[in-house]
Image (cartoon, rainbow, N blue to C red):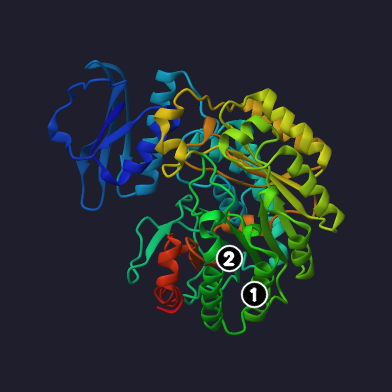
Amino acid sequence: MIQVNLNRQCFQYDVHSLVRAFYPGEEVRVDCTQRESDGTKPLPTDGELFFLRVAFVPDCVEAADQCSQIQISLCVNSEERLHMEGSCLEADRHETKNELKRLLYRLLSDYSGRILPWGNLTGIRPTKIPMALLNQGWKNSAIADYMRRTYYTSNEKTALAIAIANRERYLLEKLELNQELAPGHTDEAEPLSDLRFVQTDVPDHLESAEERPADPFWNGYSLYIGIPFCPSICLYCSFSSSPIALWKNQVDAYLDTLLYEMEQVAKLLPGRGPDTVYIGGGTPTTLEPEQMERLLSKIETCFDLSRTQEFTVEAGRPDSISREKLAVLKKHGITRISINPQTMNQETLDFIGRKHTVEETEEAFALAREMGFDNINMDLIVGLPGEGAPEVEHTMQVLSGMAPDSITVHSLAVKRAARLRLFREEHKELTFENSSAIMDMTAAYTREAGLYPYYLYRQKNMAGNFENVGYAREGCEGLYNILIMEEIQTILALGAGASTKLVYPGNRICRVENVKDIKNYMERIDEMIERKRAGLYG
């Protein structure tokens, strides 16, 4: 266990995340109740790996500014082993946070002997930084220098983030977004009713464009439809999904509610059609062909799809795919599907709870190709229990032979709601391996297959502190993936557990959540619709 005493609660998340990045297997507790006057000699606790004291000590106070020293001490058995200090102007919260994280990163790196590939970046999607700077006219070389100095990102990850940001800007031009608006930074959330706001963390010195009316559709919008059912629940999964076997007799009732939400929300959008549509889950292809037909027909009735440039259905599990279901998707002009193996090693599939075989993945892919689907994505996960470089390479070799149009490489992130965390004592003997060599190997295979990186994001608790990267051949990139990760366009989300993200000029973002529980969603659907109406129009 690692104990941290911190006397600025507003930085609790940043400190906790960075310590966890260096020590992912350790419990980290951050106590923000102590103040500067509490003393500098912490008492050790049983089982403690080390103790950190992070203190902001006032240096001088003037009329408008407060200068402080940031003092960080690392103690083992009450003995101080490392100490670092820096100065900050606390009125500049963003730069104060950067200085705090730089000091803490250097101290933890010195003590552990580790260098993190993404440096001290936590709580931010790496491509947001170069994207914002590119919008301000910065050159790639200047952006690279800024990222390495400010966040200590490695040369390789800095180059990856900048390359993907440039690719994203090129791809988004076809959507005719209002790209003149560069994302800005605001530290405080703005209240609106009982809705929860989040703010995007990008460099403070970037100025946003002139104020616009508070219109969440000023930059267009995309549509997400959630189907919260799966053939089985994977060991690592924390999504809002339920086993289809338990809900088989209520799927039609869920669809009734979903289609009603669709009708009512569409009335709030007169004359507006989505740029992209994404049906995810869960596993949408757990729906029977007639249920899928009903869903897709209703989408076409409720929304103007004449300007829609991408329509994705996440077919997901190979064992949920049939010729009849694919025929329905083809009939309705679905442009992109995903068939997700996660791994092509049968032993791993069996262990993590995927109730399909490697052969079923290959058969489902071949069937989709036979039926004319020419934009097929395949997801895989690096860092699965018991898998190392040989197993990952086997998966890449098999996928290369199948030649999908895009491959998304995920680094395993085990979240709190996953069974792997809930029952960690049962699985404590498992190994989760990821490394720069493994990630480089996946990148090499995709490059050899003619697929190039086009979007990137990171999550908490990722194996090896790495990232998720989408690779695609020219013209087969997932536009929806870019839009939702860069948070530059409103995403209207329907269904149980779906999270609408309203993006306003000035980069103010409002989330409007649907309840996750399926039964609650069906019983409280009018409340879900009212939440969206209030979020859209106040």
- Circle 2 residue: 225
Up the image or down, 329 lies above or below 306; here it is: above
Q: Is residue 231 visible?
A: yes
Q: Quadrant of the N terminus?
A: top left
Q: Residues within 10 Å of mark 1 (few under 14, many from 20)?
A: some
Q: Earlier in the sequence, mark 2 or mark 1?
A: 2
Distance (Cα) linking label 2 and label 1: 9 Å
Report the front residue among 137 and 183: 183
- Position of residue 474 measured from the top left corner of the image (x, y, whole percent): 80, 51
Check contact, mark 2 vs mark 1: CB within 8 A: yes
Q: Quadrant of the C terminus?
A: bottom left
Q: Secondary structure at mark 2?
A: strand
Q: Secondary structure at mark 1?
A: helix
Q: Residues within 10 Å of mark 2 (few under 14, many from 20)?
A: many
- Position of residue 282 measured from the top left corner of the image (x, y, whole percent): 57, 55
- Circle 1 residue: 299
Q: Is residue 54 visible?
A: no
The residue type indicated by label 1 comes to: Ile
> What residue sits 60% from the left and 68% below the top?
223
Up the image or down, 328 lies above or below 530; here it is: above
Report the front residue among 105 and 307: 307
- Position of residue 518 measured from the top left corner of the image (x, y, whole percent): 46, 62
Report the front residue among 408 and 126: 408
- Position of residue 115 measured from the top left corner of the image (x, y, whole percent): 51, 25
> What residue sits 66% from the left and 81% below the top?
301
> What residue sits 64% from the left and 77% below the top?
298
Up the image or down, 203 lies above or below 330; here it is: above
> Which label number is shown at residue 454?
none
